[in-house]
Image: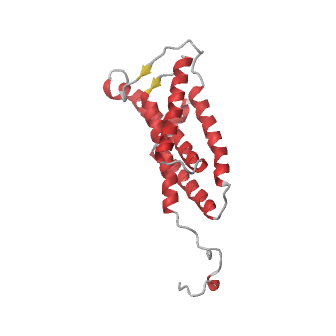
Amino acid sequence: MWEIILYVNPLTVTAGILVCQFVCVLAVRFEQKGHESVTRIAKIPLGIFLGITLLATLIPSQGIGTGDSTVWVIPGQGILFDNSAMGDMERSMYILQQVANAAMFLPLGICFRFAFTRANLSTAAIAGCGLSLIIELAQWMMNAGRVVDIDDVIVNTAGAFIGALLYTLAKHFTPPQSKAAGKSPQHRRGVQL
């Protein structure tokens, strides 16, 4: 599963964010047309992304109870403070993993905001943080070769926040459609083009 980080680069990250923003704008347009089902429909991809996230983060890399229980509680512990712990290649892979973690939580933030329209940015970030804490706790309890890392919680929360922010930007900057938007120009009297 870790091989996905080999595809993380500035182009794929930018493309992923743009696709997410495009989906947000489409969903906002759909909502503006009076379709109230967007909230219900958003719960389906939210459940799918939640399932994928749990699978990706909780599949053990070795037998349950056979790993060491490494816990990094200092933010940036492995990459910033202990330069001897990682070589250049390992450091690069660690950074790519963190970017992939944030990207994995981005759709969760978007779907969360569409599914729960009364939720705000901070609620989505708190939900992302809570899910990330649950994942890290489960990884620690399984003791199956996964490192419990506070950096994962931080970047996952940031990913959920950025996803919720993309939703907010789409809601704020997508102009409402006028009632005459579907009519041809000759039907719009009094409007000069």
Q: What colour scheme was applied to this rendering of the protein?
A: secondary structure
Q: Which corner quadrant holds the N terminus?
A: top right
Q: Residue at x 62, y 43 (%)?
A: 46
Residue 111 can be seen in this image = yes
Image location of residue 56, percent across then percent down: 58, 31
* 191, above or below 30, in the image: below
- Residue plotted at (53% across, 47% down): 119
Residue nearest the observer in this picture, 158 or 95: 158
Q: In this view, does 80 lie above or below 118?
A: above
Q: Is residue 4 above or below residue 112?
A: above
Q: What number of labels is visible?
A: 0
Residue 24 falls left or right of residue 84: right
At which x and y percent is residue 22? 55, 56
Whether residue 186 sits left or right of residue 169 in the image: it is: right
**Residue 118 screen position, x and y as percent:** 55, 50
**Residue 113: where, in percent of width, then height?**
55, 48
Q: Is residue 73 rendered to the left or right of residue 145? A: left
Q: Which residue lies furthest to the front in this view?
A: 118
Q: Judge by depth and name the residue closer to the eye, 88 or 68.
A: 68
